Amino acid sequence: MSHPRLHARTSPDKPAVVMSDGAPGLSYAELEDRANRGAHLMRSLGIGRGDSIAFWLPNCPEVFEVYWAGQRAGLYITPVATALTAAEADYILENSGAKLLVASPAIAGLAGLARRTGLAILTVEEWRAALARQPAGPIGDESPGFHMVYSSGTTGRPKGIRLPLPEGEVTAPHQLSDQISARYGLGPDDVYLSPAPLYHTAPLAYSTACHRLGATVVQMPKFEPEEALMAIERHRVTMTQMVPTMFVRLLKLPEATRRRHDLSSLRHVIHAAAPCPVPVKRAMIEWMGPILFEYYGGSEGNGSTGITSAEWLQKPGSVGKAGWGTLHICDDAGDELPAGEQGIVYFEGGWDFQYLGDPEKTKDSRNPKHPSWSTLGDVGYVDADGYLFLTDRKSHMIISGGVNIYPQEVENLLITHPKVADAAVIGVPDPDFGEQVKAVVQPMDMADATPAFADELTAFCKAHISHVKCPRSVDFDPALPRLDNGKLYKRLIRDRYWPAKAGLTG
């Protein structure tokens, strides 16, 4: 069975969502009832198939109520990150064409959100009250919807990743949950720990896949290392998905604390979203056993790779073989390269995604000679055995703690400061987050190159964009390396902080 409705019929009292902090969760019967009422509410607001809705919520059961209501109403469902400012959220809402936003009043940016015509905004309390007034049972014109997430582009503006809506019955099997079931054996007997924010694609996709397959989702409000171990032990968790930053925090716990908790129920610890340092992953395998499974892919769904612990120990640093789609490594002209040569990573055979309202970015993601091959902009090579190794990111995207950060948005902001002549933003090594954001600034007057001015620039950024994008440190340079055509030669700056990568192109 591949839909929570079917599990609500056979196991109505089974927990669909358990909150790890003891807050109320949802049974499958409750999830089905609220999703149906939510679909009626959306229709009452004039929201029809192909329209968009959004949620701006922390990790809570209402995320799943909104998601499954939208899924059976044929809608695109867009998560909005809780840390975004009002202006950042407003751009996503306007760009997506969202007609409904369900938001927590605790979200800092909500009060400043633009109230535009055609967008209904409901707080969690208003959502609950509105559901109570709706009829029970399915709407009469059900059709399947799907999420539409946003991924920042190199121009700094987020890009909506839009896929064709599924056809057929809302309870029909879905490719994503089928893949997860086949890859990990996920089924109704499983308990899945979701420690990450549900506004990220992978946590949302995997948690909702669990509902399709009848598993129980144990949702953490926020990741805390020992609380995660306690949740695994208490709920006999069989599967979880984390990012390398979480591994680092877990490994920093005292060994006695780590060994105190019974983790024997775990079958799979899945990780992705950011490169995992080889020593960190090796330490995790030594602690938890060969149950780590890594994959590489993107929200675009154009393909993915996967690698087991046993394979990784033979190929340290690899993200595995293609499990969805066919891998191609190509040069800038689009020609395929032989094994061992570094180039742009393309997939063939995955979903045919589009970037909403940005045909140029969509076109740029396609191979110039093979338009059905698409890339996420990463650079790597495939060895003779077909294993992929990622070596750089063509766009210089920064991944800090599993969060994708694109430098140009920050650079464009910094350059507006009256005392700044030029700015470059890069990722530099961070022992906890993999990378952290660093700004290298050319002041109008080098006499301003002081710690006080660095603090001023950091505060300036925090006043305008989400704090997760803001520089953690600021260095000064009398002249940034720009070519005659105005292009910033960022590799020369990166090489100061990544000496081992000094030979890479970029």
Image: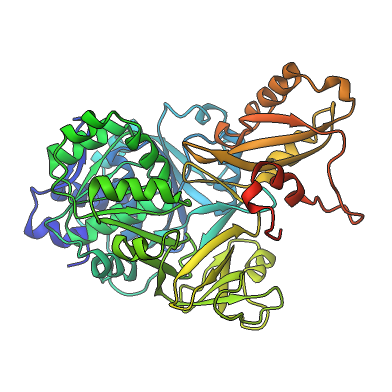
Quarter of the image where the C terminus is located:
bottom right
Please say if 406 is above or below 352: above
Q: Quadrant location of residue 287?
A: top left
Q: In the image, what residue occupies the spot 17% across and 67% down?
A: 1
Q: Height in image: 461 above or below 127?
A: above
68 relative to 98 in the view: left or right: left
Decide which of 423, 10 is in the foreground and name it: 423
> Where does the image place residue 398, in percent across and percent down from the top left?
59, 47
Asked whether residue 68 is in view, the answer is no
Percent of width and height locating residue 217: 22, 47
**Does residue 495 sit above or below 132 in this rendering?**
below
- Looking at the image, the residue that sits furthest to the top is 452
Residue 262 position, x and y percent, is 13, 39
Residue at image position (61%, 80%) is 337
Is residue 104 shown to the viewer in this render?
A: yes
| Residue toward you, 212 or 404 | 404
Q: How is the image coloured?
A: rainbow
Label count reads 0
Q: Residue furthest right?
A: 484
Q: Locate residue 412, reporting x and y percent.
A: 75, 41
